[in-house]
Image (spheres, rainbow, N blue to C red):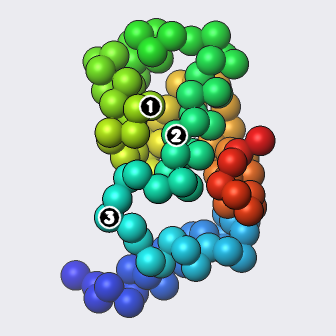
Amino acid sequence: MGTPYRVTQSFVSIIVHIGLSPQWNYFLAVTRSIYTARHDALRLALIRARKAAGLTQTELAAKLQRGQSWVSKYERGELRLDVVEFFEVTTAIGTDGLALLRRWSRSTDGVVR
């Protein structure tokens, strides 16, 4: 098993490789709370993307083979998606997850436009 330093360096390499903002350093100080402005902005962006795709929570849940309550929990901010789940959600919605992350990482106020 690698050291936390190697994990962090690998993570940084991924962030740089996919073209996220140089402000990536906020990722290194991982917050334990899901109740942050940046998490809220990403959560709201996923809700907007789902609604723009014309999907209900129930329809999205069916595509993901999950319960509607799971979608509701991450949309309300009670559940934090991991990176694999995030891309499963964006794929099911039909939106580009990387583009959404890039817009989010470059926003100064955390709002994804």
Q: Earlier in the sequence, mark 1 or mark 3?
A: 3
Task: Point out the image quarter for the C terminus.
Answer: top right
User: Mark 1 touching mark 2, by CB under 8 A?
Assistant: yes
Say whether residue 40 is left or right of residue 109: left
* Residue type at tag 2: Arg
Indicate the amino acid at tag 3: Arg
Q: Which numbered marker is on residue 43?
A: 2
Looking at the rendered image, the quarter that the N terminus falls into is: bottom left
Residue 8 vertical placement versus 105 (above, below)? below
> How many marks on residues?
3
- Counting from the top left corner in percent of width and height, residue 36 is at 47, 56
Image position, residue 34 (x, y; %): 38, 53
Q: Residues within 10 Å of mark 2 (few under 14, many from 20)?
A: many
Q: Position of residue 25 (x, y in %)?
A: 58, 79
Comes first in the chain, label 3 or label 2: 3
Mark linked to residue 17: none
Residue that numbered label 1 is attached to = 75
